[in-house]
Amino acid sequence: MKVMGIVNQKGGVAKTTTAQALAFGLNAKGYKVLMIDFDAQGSLTTSCGLTVTQEMSTAFEFLNLSVKLKDDFKNIVVNLREGLDIIPSDIRLEEANVALAGKPMRELYLSKAISSIASENYDYVIIDTNPSLSLLTFNVLCAVDEIIIPFKPEYQSVQGVRLLIQTVNELKALSDIKINGFLITIADLRRNSTKEAIDYLNDFAQSIGTKVYKSVIRQITAVADAPSAGKSIFEFKPQAAQDYLNFVEEFLTGGNK
Ligand SMILES: Nc1ncnc2c1ncn2[C@@H]1O[C@H](COP(=O)(O)OP(=O)(O)OP(=O)(O)O)[C@@H](O)[C@H]1O
Ligand SMILES: [Mg+2]
């Protein structure tokens, strides 16, 4: 079981879109995947066509479970299709920031919860995160094997990734976090500023010994329309999913194909 976090504290850079595409793409290739919506906005949950009710358990309850988890786990995950489950989220997760604040080892709650999942149940766990560097994000960073950083190529993105890498380095005292790579998202390749931001990212990635995915996710209207239909881009408009298909392929082969 490999645990992947899709992380960037900048808002609107396609974290949720990427988490969903990666999870559905891996599932389509026959892998067993668990998605964890770790954002109180619940965008990944609703993008999968799910509505959370008061009776349902969410990532908030998942965090609080420990010993009893094995019995209760089946009541928290929602099965979407063969080999694809999700732990949904809603605004309740906001409370976790407060609830965790006074606890010892507060960065490690998600890691503990995930370690009690029977690892033979899933090949991949894909975690979507909220756009901040909060305690919730620290929990994700300490729970994952690797992170993928979606990067929307524009001027304002540049400082953000520096801060993120600095945070990752600080948390290395608690957890061995590997950066899988940067993924360029929502790219408008006609703009000069896009090219400048991509050049910057390539230099920066090289300076920290990290790769930038060769697959670039271009800005395509259909991708923006898919969430409101509650479908992944592969189902919503397969013709518009080529960039994400390339990305999933590159993720699996490490680009050696
Ligand atoms: N390749 C794309 N082309 C066009 N629109 C896109 C693309 N990828 C994502 N979008 C749209 O851009 C917006 C932001 O994407 P998304 O919600 O995935 O970002 P996010 O990083 O998860 O945002 P947040 O920080 O709020 O969680 C959404 O409306 C989404 O549908
Ligand atoms: Mg999101």
Image (cartoon, rainbow, N blue to C red):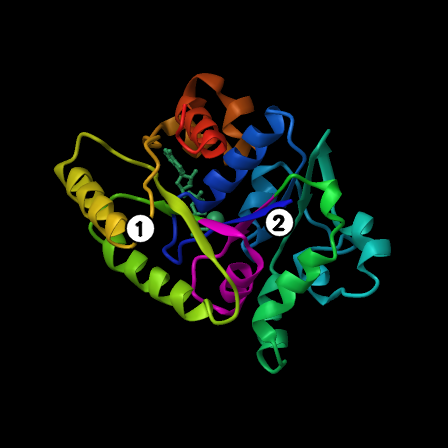
Residue at (22% x, 31% y) in the render = 189
Indicate whether residue 220 is drawn in magenta.
no
Q: Is residue 140 left or right of residue 88?
A: left
Q: Amino acid at mark 2?
A: Ile
Q: Nearer the viewer, mark 1 or mark 2?
A: 1
Residue at the extreme left: 192
Q: Is residue 13 visible?
A: no
The N terminus appears in which quarter of the rendering? top right
Q: Amino acid at mark 1?
A: Gly
Q: Which residues are magenta?
A: 125-147
The C terminus appears in which quarter of the rendering? top left
Rendered position, 242 above or below 226: above
Residue at (18% x, 42% y) in the render = 199
The residue where tag 2 is placed is 36
The residue where tag 1 is placed is 209
Residue at (81% x, 65% y) in the render = 67
| Image spot of residue 143 (x, y percent) | 58, 59
Q: Is residue 192 left or right of residue 126?
A: left
Q: Tell me which numbered mark, 1 or 2, is placed earlier along the sequence.
A: 2
Cα distance in 3D space between marks 1 and 2 = 28 Å
Which of the pair 228/29 is nearer the observer?
29
Indicate whether residue 128 is drawn in magenta.
yes
* Helix, strand or loop for disc 1: loop
User: What number of labels is visible?
Assistant: 2
Which of the pair 193/95 is nearer the observer?
193
Count residues near mark 1 (Cα–Cα under 10 Å), then give few for <14, some for 14-19, many for 20+: few
